[in-house]
């Protein structure tokens, strides 16, 4: 096993991928994520399609694949989330945002869309509609 200081340096690098604004390759995907509470460590990747398609027989329209692998919380991992999206582009642009959304769900940070019962509006039979206002139902 590598020395503790080497492991710490690697972990700091993985944490910087999501938290180092302007430097971390997935920092923009995690810009609105509560990293101060749940630090995510990760690695972006792009599985590139070769320039010479004739050697592998792939059609010329093939695109790179987007990859992001991660764990959180970084200091005491409870979750490992990885994503691979074939023919979708760079890891930071497709896979990392998808993983950020998965962590929002896993950590209970996603909020469901408002329903009529929570917005004050309700519907009756088909074709009829009622709205609740401060003065009552109309």
Image (tube, rainbow, N blue to C red):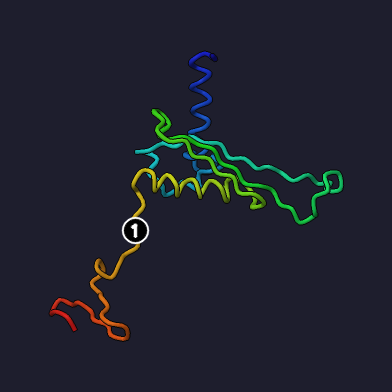
Up-down: is 5 above or below 128? above
* Residue 9 image offset from top left, x and y in percent: 52, 23
Q: Which residue is drawn at 49% across and 42% down?
A: 21
Would residue 53 appear left or right of 33 to someone viewing this image?
right
Q: How many labels does the image show?
A: 1
Quadrant of the rendered structure where residue 36 is? top left
**Quarter of the C terminus within the rendering:** bottom left
Quadrant of the rendered structure where residue 116 is? bottom left
Q: Name the residue under label 1.
A: 112
Would residue 91 appear left or right of 114 to someone viewing this image?
right
Q: Which residue is drawn at 34% across and 58% down?
A: 112
* Residue 60 image offset from top left, x and y in percent: 80, 54
Camera-side residue: 63 or 24? 63
* Residue 124 image offset from top left, x and y in percent: 25, 80
Q: Residue furthest bottom?
A: 127
**Quarter of the N terminus within the rendering:** top right
* Residue 122 image offset from top left, x and y in percent: 25, 75
Would residue 47 appear left or right of 22 to someone viewing this image?
right
Up-down: is 132 above or below 100? below
Q: Residue furthest front?
A: 125
User: Label 1: few (<14), some or many (≥20) within 10 Å?
Assistant: few
Q: Which residue is drawn at 27% across and 78% down?
A: 123
- SS for callout 1: loop
Would residue 57 appear left or right of 36 to someone viewing this image?
right
Q: Residue furthest left?
A: 135
Up-down: is 71 above or below 85? above
Up-down: is 43 above or below 76? below
């Amino acid at each position: 096993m590598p020395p503790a200081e080497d492991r710490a340096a690697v972990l700091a690098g993985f944490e910087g991928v999501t938290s180092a604004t302007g430097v971390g390759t997935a920092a923009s995907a995690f810009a609105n994520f509560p990293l101060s509470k749940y630090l995510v460590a990760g690695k972006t990747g792009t599985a590139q399609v070769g320039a010479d398609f004739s050697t592998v027989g792939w059609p010329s329209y093939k695109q790179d694949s987007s990859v992001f692998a991660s764990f959180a919380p970084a200091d005491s991992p409870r979750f490992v989330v990885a994503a691979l999206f074939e023919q979708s582009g760079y890891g930071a642009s497709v896979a990392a945002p998808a993983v950020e959304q998965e962590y929002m769900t896993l950590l209970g940070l996603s909020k469901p869309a408002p329903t009529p019962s929570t917005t004050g509006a309700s519907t009756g039979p088909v074709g009829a509609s009622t709205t609740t206002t401060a003065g009552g139902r109309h």
